[in-house]
Amino acid sequence: MNDLQPGQRFSLPEGQGISVRFDGRDASRLAVAAITPQGQAIAFDQIDHGQWALQSLHRIGKQADIIVYITDDTQGGFASYAYPASLQIGSDHYRLPAPSEQLAAVIIGEIYTRDGTLRIKVSNEGYTFGIDAYIRARNFTSISIPHRKRRNAEQTPPLGPDHHDSRPSGSTIGTGSGVIVGSNLIVTNAHVIEGGTSFFLSRTRTFVTALAVDELHDLALLQGNVQGEPLPLRLAAPLWLGESIMASGFPLMDLLGGDLKVTTGNVSGLTGGMGDVSRFQFTAPIGSGSSGGAIIDEAGNVVGITSASLAHRDVRKRGSISENVNFGVKASLVYELIAAAGMPLPDITVLHDANRRSVVNRLRDSVVSITVLA
């Protein structure tokens, strides 16, 4: 078996198929596809545990990426965990180079045509944030990824826009909130932008693009020409039970108007549902459209991002009543998302001015409304 090196190129024999095999852990969570520059995804067939094959290279055409990806990346994990990996073309066997980073989607080869001959360039690069990040990088607006497993509805439903996929392209499918956390960087919830193809800031109509999405922790990082002041993330001091907080965002804009709303409450639990340590519970009232907004301490430092509210209907079915049981994603996850996306790390120098009027005025320059388009 020959060892392949990143960047190595060689010709592909005519009329042959191609097979990829993964022998590491998590191999059962992978799928392989060839994706053309036009956004057509050609599925490889699974022929064995961790082994995928395309019977004929003719199906690819003149150019395509061969990409391996986690099919259920909302549950975490990386395709690189499934290495070592091997490639078979006809009767020839090769050992693929392993990625040097943790990637949830890996381009193992780039197929192209030169002088009428189909060739392959070996690669081991990809995307930490999975196949969705690849789709965004290629600007594919409509593509069906084979074997993809989408997340199931949560028991604590998010508060983001009510998406209707049947709406015509370019129409508004919902709104949510976001927080400026760095130069031209906005954090919001993954579920706020889910199903959308483009996004703009409602007040200035400035378009922003999705830079990174972490569906597991329900966070998304947007980038664009943003006017406003970043809010600092509070990382050095942990949340404490009973701590006073304020929630800010743009709930129910069609009923309550497009101005910023701020509510007060306290930290009512240090974990989310089922003991999830990446989230916490708070009591400040929120509503649909609040998702992605800032949860701040008394001095205006971001301690979390509004994410979800308890499903009251399900609780009532159990004979109970719940009031203001809401969930936020901790600020430390925002910091990690920005770092993983390779962007400049945000300011963590905490604010100390606890004058309520000054704190709320800062929010006006830092919390934005996001419109999502089909």
Image: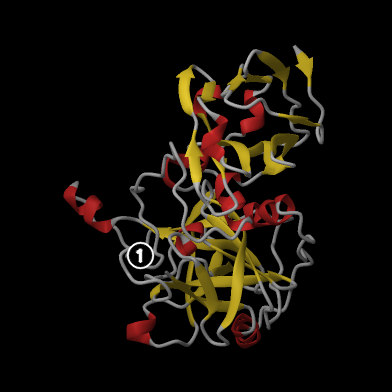
- Viewer-proximal residue among 261 and 55: 55
Picture residue at 46% right of the left edge, 58% below the top? 142
- Residue 115 seen anywhere in this rendered image of the structure: yes
Residue that extends furthest to the front in the rendered view of this protein? 116
Under mark 1, the amino acid is His
Which residue does the numbered mark 1 point to in the structure image?
163
Across and down, in percent, residue 87 comes to 66, 21
Q: Residue at x 63, y 78 (%)?
A: 366
Question: Which is more toward the observer, 140 or 195?
Answer: 140
- Residue beneath the point at 69% across and 78% down: 225
Rendered view: 222 above or below 93: below
Is 204 situated left or right of 171 in this image?
Answer: right
**Residue 297 visible in this rendered orientation of the protein:** no
Quadrant (top left, top right, bottom left, bottom right) of the C terminus: bottom left
| Mark 1 crowdedness (10 Å alpha carbons): few <14, some 14-19, many ≥20 | many
- Percent of width and height locating residue 7: 82, 36
x%, y% of residue 369? 51, 78
Q: Of residues 66 and 298, which is closer to you in this image?
A: 66
- Residue at 56% x, 71% y is 178
Quadrant containing the N terminus is: top right
Q: Is residue 64 left or right of residue 141?
A: right
Q: As displayed, is residue 347 above or below residue 333?
A: below
Residue 95 rendering spot, x and y as whole percentages:
73, 19
